[in-house]
Image (cartoon, rainbow, N blue to C red):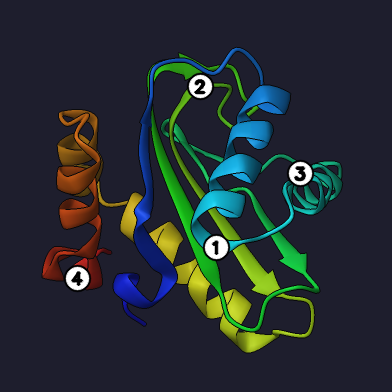
Amino acid sequence: MDMTTLLNPKAVRFIASATSKKRLFQTIGEAARTVYGLETESVIGALQERESLGPTGVGHGVAVPHARLDEIDRVLGVFFRLDKPLDYGSVDKAPVDLVFALFAPRDAGVEHLKALAFISRTLRNPRICEKLRANDDPTKLYAILSSGEVTKAA
């Protein structure tokens, strides 16, 4: 799996503030509409539906909200670095500042799971997270995420 197949450079953003998880999902939905042409309300609804099953805050300031959508034919992503960490209800109770939202086709089985595993491995790498947190330029954030170092993430 390769980050450049999941993530459009225009889907990487530095967000000055997100006041709530609901507002964050709204911003993710707007980015998905702008970059991928997805329906904002569909994205928000799918993210909220998945979140109702359990928190997607995986710990150490990282969240990986994800959802399945009828309107896409491949796995797509949106990445945000938040300037101010957000109380997200994560498993470790730590606020979140790195958010990688992942969208998969409704019938994507293994590809969705592979993408989730890839993103999780990437964002469990402390070196990568440190670099992401040290930058607010979307171009640099994309370069960090799409570097060869990501594939070596443990």
The residue tagged with tag 1: helix, strand or loop?
helix
Label 1 – label 2 distance at C-alpha: 30 Å
Asked where in the image residue 61 lies, by quadrant, the reply is top left
| Residue where numbered disc 2 is placed | 94
Query: What residue lies at 52% left-to-right and 79% top-to-bottom?
Result: 114
Q: Nearer the viewer, mark 3 or mark 1?
A: 1
Marks 1 and 2 close (CB-CB < 8 Å) = no
Residue 52 found in image quarter: top right
Three-letter amino acid code of the residue under disc 4: Lys
Q: Is residue 144 left or right of residue 84?
A: left
Asked if 19 appears above or below 140 in the picture, the reply is: above
In percent of width and height, residue 92 lies at: 55, 29
Q: Which residue is mark 1?
A: 36
Q: Earlier in the sequence, mark 1 or mark 4?
A: 1
Q: CA distance from mark 4 to mark 3?
A: 32 Å
Residue underneath mark 3:
44
Residue at 63 percent across and 64 percent down: it is: 103
Q: Position of residue 79 (x, y in %)?
A: 42, 47
**Disc ID at residue 152:** 4
Q: Are marks 2 and 4 in contact (CB under 8 Å)?
A: no
Count of residue discs: 4
Looking at the rendered image, the disc whose residue lies closer to the viewer, 1 or 4, is 1
Mark 3 belongs to which amino acid? Ile
Mark 2 and 3 residues: CB-CB less than 8 Å, in contact? no
